């Protein structure tokens, strides 16, 4: 299981891990045994804590009444909520790696597919944090760009007539692409011009979440295009695009969820 | 349909103290989150269900 994979990393960082659901302890016991889980699975049978915390999914069908909205609380050393992320659907969940990197900011090895592309002044490397997807899972696509010395590319906001860095993922059925997490650009001004720019230079990283709601769709080819315009302090190259493609395999679904919309 | 990926602003706010609460673990043993944490940072993950 995802969280089991990161439990050692968390322990090494001195972070305690707890997973809470509304299942009674015996259901948790058989789940832990089947999946080799060693971290605490805690039972909030009756959903009292879930209600106390204000995360009950009040819209859930009667058959699954009592489930929480899925999400995480990050507690600091004093037990204060330092960060939280909750989602609408009971289907949604982060991968363990996604939690490590995007919630806790701990770098982890990605073991998904990778690819590369290059233009004259920009090199692109893209990867997924996992090789497979499964129903209800969110994977992170990371795109790293290396911009040649002396060049910059534009971020937002941007004056009219210039092309900002953008990333587009070709639509796939039952796959939702979330908003990209852009790095913070730096202000830039060309001598003699009134226009104010936000630019990126050197090595930058953009990540975006993809949620998979397909079942039995098999391998999916994820295609994306990065568009950008590279400039020096004195001249701009023509707008450019870099395309990439990576194949994700579907992991077998151990237990297919019963509730359906 | 609402965007299933959208983050919801719900639950105990950032800056609030997580309640001291006793729950049973997979071995049936009582675990008090705050005591068990023993001063460590913690990641508390809420799941739909282990049964499905």
Image (tube, grey):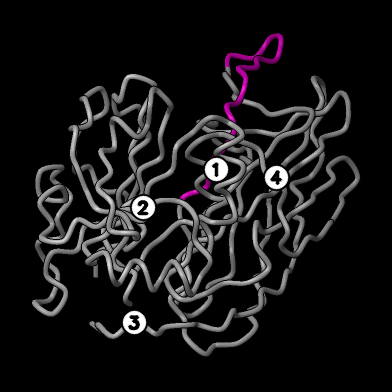
Same chain, marks 2 and 1? Answer: yes
Q: Which residue is mark 2?
A: A19
Residue A193 among magenta residues: yes
Give me the disc on residue A257: 3
Q: Residue at x 13, y 80 (%)?
A: A63
Q: CA distance from mark 1 to mark 4?
A: 30 Å
Residue A86 among magenta residues: no
Which callout, 1 or 4, points at the residue further toward the start of the chain? 1
Q: Circles 3 and 1: CB distance less than 8 Å?
A: no
Which callout, 2 or 3, points at the residue further toward the start of the chain? 2
Which callout, 2 or 1, points at the residue further toward the start of the chain? 2
Q: Which residue is mark 1?
A: A100
Using the image, name the chain to which the residue with label 1 belongs. Answer: A
Image quarter of residue A165: top right
- Callout 2 secondary element: strand
Q: Which residues are magenta?
A: A179-194
């Amino acid at each position: 299981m995802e969280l089991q994979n990161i439990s050692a990393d968390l322990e090494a960082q001195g972070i305690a891990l707890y997973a809470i659901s509304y299942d009674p302890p015996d259901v948790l016991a058989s789940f832990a045994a089947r999946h080799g889980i060693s971290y605490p699975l805690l039972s909030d049978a009756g959903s009292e804590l879930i209600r106390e915390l204000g995360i009950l999914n009040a819209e859930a069908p009667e058959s699954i009444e009592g489930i929480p909205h899925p999400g995480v609380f990050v507690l600091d050393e004093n037990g204060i909520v330092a960060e939280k992320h909750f989602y609408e659907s009971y289907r949604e969940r982060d991968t363990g790696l996604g939690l490590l990197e995007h919630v806790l900011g701990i770098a982890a090895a990605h073991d998904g597919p990778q690819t590369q592309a290059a233009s004259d002044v920009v090199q692109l490397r893209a990867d997924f944090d996992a090789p497979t997807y499964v129903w209800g899972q969110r994977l992170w696509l990371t795109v790293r760009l290396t911009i040649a010395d002396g060049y910059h590319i534009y971020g937002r906001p941007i004056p009219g007539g210039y092309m900002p860095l953008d990333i587009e993922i070709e639509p796939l059925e039952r796959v939702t692409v979330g908003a990209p997490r852009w790095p913070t650009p730096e202000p830039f001004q060309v001598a003699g011009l009134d226009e104010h720019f936000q630019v990126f230079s050197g090595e930058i990283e953009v990540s975006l979440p993809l949620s998979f709601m397909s079942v039995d769709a098999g391998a999916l080819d994820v295609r994306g295009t990065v568009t950008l315009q590279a400039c020096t302090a004195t001249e701009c190259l023509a707008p450019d695009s870099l395309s990439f493609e990576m194949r994700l395999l579907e992991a077998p679904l151990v237990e297919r969820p019963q509730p359906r919309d | 349909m609402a965007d299933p990926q959208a983050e919801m602003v719900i639950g105990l706010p950032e800056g609030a103290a997580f309640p001291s609460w006793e729950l049973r673990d997979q071995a049936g043993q009582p675990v008090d989150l705050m005591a068990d944490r023993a001063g460590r940072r913690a990641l508390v993950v809420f799941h739909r269900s282990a049964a499905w």
